[in-house]
Image (cartoon, rainbow, N blue to C red):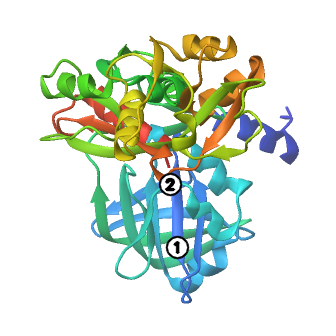
Amino acid sequence: MTTNLPDSAQVTSEFKRAMRRLASTVTIISTADVNGNRYGMTATAVNSLTMDPPSLLICVNHSASIHPALIGRGRFCVNVLTTEHEDLVSAFSGRLKGDARFEVGEWHNEDSGMPYLEGAQCNLFCDIDSVVPFGTHSVVIGRVSAVRVEEGIRPLIFADGKLGATQSLTGHVRIASNLSTLTQFLPADLESFLKKHPLIDVHLEEKVSTAVLTAVQENACDIGLIVEGPKVSGLEVIPYRDDRLVLTVPEGHPLAGKASTKFADTLDYDYVGLHTGSQINLQIQRAAAEIDKAWHCRMQVHTYDALAAMVQAGLGIGMLPLKMAQLYARAMNIKVVELDEPWAHRRHAIVIRSYDSLQAAGKRLIDHLKRASQ
């Protein structure tokens, strides 16, 4: 009786299919050569070896750009990724080359100059003990010399050719946001967050920035988003995004042909303003008072849509964030004029009582917003 053994090509093909069923935690192997040049690669072929001594093994292709530097330096770091690090996977898998890879994520150097990822699940610093060539790869055994571990366990998993998480985090997060931040930045950031965490319930309410601060202070919301300006006391402030205020005018207006203008020159015309308490209104009032001129606000509305519609109708000029003004200018008969004023540049910020006071879902959202703003 004879047995028909599969040929090597078939074994290789079936082996690849089998390995798609083997879920692995995604890591980035990082190192630096003696000249300080940094190298990194995405890797799933990482395993613990022994506890005594603490050691692990990694497998690195001979053709990988990191291979000569890693072997030559004799030291490396294993950075275990979280579910927030999907963007790093492609960057360190060939989308970016050389040191440009380290522009994605928050990277630091430890005392020996070894690069490591801040915010990783953990960082394992290793000295090479031995290298075993096998086929196309080197099996590198590293003795663990130092470890950094973050709280919370949320590893990024690779299985069946896809990235994912071991389990979906649940929870509830209450957000209060001013209109400018809500319309310009939150839609995309919340969409990407909820795509990763579909079981987290997010409740969002629009408020003026001063009311946002009050809501956070009184624990009426977990996370607040403001335009910097109001005095913040007793809260943790995290930088988020920047924007610029611009002027919107109807076609045919005397200012419509200008690329930019000084704020003082706009005060000869009637304005359409936003509702009382809005940061844009408050900024206009402060700027007018500083040059001792009156601001003629002909009417006030609650939304950017209404303001743009009134401007298009020729009922006044208005001030909007650049991103929103450009959207309306493409769809309506209005023109955008830059404001030649330093205060037209604004900073948006996240405010919380404290990071430690947040539940896991809130912490995850803060981490996501910080990463999205980089």
- In the picture, residue 170 is in which quadrant? top left
- Left or right of 351 in this view: 109: right
Quadrant of the image containing the N terminus = top right
Q: Secondary structure at mark 2?
A: loop
In 3D space, how far apart are the residues under numbered discs 2 and 1 (Cα atoms)? 16 Å
Image coordinates for residue 237, horizontal then vertical, percent: 27, 44
Marks 2,1: beta carbons within 8 A: no
Residue appearing at x 15%, y 22% in the figure = 219
Is residue 179 visible in the rendered structure shown here? Answer: yes
Task: Report the amino acid beneath label 2.
Answer: Gly
**Residue 268 vs residue 354, the one in the foreground:** 268
Image coordinates for residue 195, horizontal then vertical, percent: 53, 22
Image coordinates for residue 217, horizontal then vertical, percent: 14, 28
Q: Earlier in the sequence, mark 2 or mark 1?
A: 1
- Left or right of 280 in this view: 13: right
Q: Secondary structure at mark 1?
A: strand
Residue appearing at x 38%, y 73% in the figure = 143
Of badges 2 and 1, the one in the foreground is 2
Crowding at mark 1 (Cα within 10 Å: few <14, some 14-19, many 20+): many
Q: Is residue 280 above or below residue 132?
A: above
Q: Which mark is residue 105?
A: 2
Dot 1 corresponds to which residue? 31
